[in-house]
Amino acid sequence: MCRVNDRARLEAALRKNTTASSDFDLNPDVDLPVGRKLRPAGVLVPVLASADGPDVLLTKRSSRLKHHPGQIAFPGGKQDDSDADVTAAALREAHEEVGLSPDRVEVLGTLPTHETVTGFLVTPVIGWIDKPFDITPEPGEVAEAFRVPLAHVTQPGLFTVQSRRWRGTRRHYYTVPFGPYYIWGATARILRGLAERLEDT
């Protein structure tokens, strides 16, 4: 059903030591306040095994949401008091957002944390899924769920740096478009980090 080396490469990549990332990586002139409070969150990077090579499952957030409407994102969200940890939060949110039951996910590990401009400290959780499931977007949060080849979003050469005005300053960020989907911001930065880990694996 899948190529054995796909999973082995991911596991090897997760064993590498790399530093945390943030939405400010490409904006070194930003003066972040010392002692700032960051809210813990977890996102699931669902890697779906297939004979043609693995895909990553991404979502397009509903345009009705208050935060990040219409953006491409991983399933996930802030850690609730009822969550044992950020991994539990990522699995819970993936179940709620796209119908992916936690018992279908084998957690391979986590990437270093990522700080967002909205004040979250996000832990990306790499999940391996080799059993079929019905992708069921939750209409209140998810406008669409779609698959993108892991090979596409882990090629460093396919990433570009773009910019836009944000709160009176020009902010630079990574992008890795796929067809009609504009993957950028925190999602692209996390994927870029994974791409760097996989490059020599």
Image: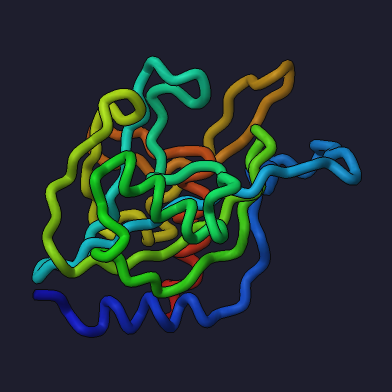
Residue 135: x and y in percent read: 17, 45
Please say if 109 is above or below 149.
below
Left or right placement of residue 57 versus residue 85 in this view: left
Looking at the rendered structure, the number of numbered marks drawn on it comes to 0
Towards the viewer: 31 or 158: 31
Examine the image and state in which quarter residue 2 appears: bottom left
> Is residue 151 shown to the viewer in this render?
no
Towards the viewer: 55 or 28: 55
Residue 115: x and y in percent read: 66, 47
Left or right placement of residue 144 versus residue 112 in this view: left
Which residue does the image show at 53% across and 34% down from the upper left? 162
Q: Which residue of the protein is positioned furthest toward the front in this rendering?
A: 82
Left or right placement of residue 179 versus residue 61 in this view: left
Residue 144: x and y in percent read: 24, 32
Examine the image and state in which quarter residue 199 appears: bottom left
Q: Please identify the quadrant where the C terminus is shown.
A: bottom left
> Is residue 15 shown to the viewer in this render?
yes
Towards the viewer: 4 or 164: 4
Left or right placement of residue 168 versus residue 143 in this view: right
Which residue does the image show at 39% across and 55% down from the upper left? 91
Which residue does the image show at 38% across and 56% down from the upper left? 45
Please say if 162 is above or below 3.
above
Examine the image and state in which quarter residue 108 appears: bottom left
Which residue does the image show at 44% across and 45% down from the upper left? 76
Q: Which residue of the protein is positioned furthest toward the right in this rendering?
A: 34
Residue 29: x and y in percent read: 81, 38
The coloring applied to the image is rainbow
Towards the viewer: 14 or 135: 135
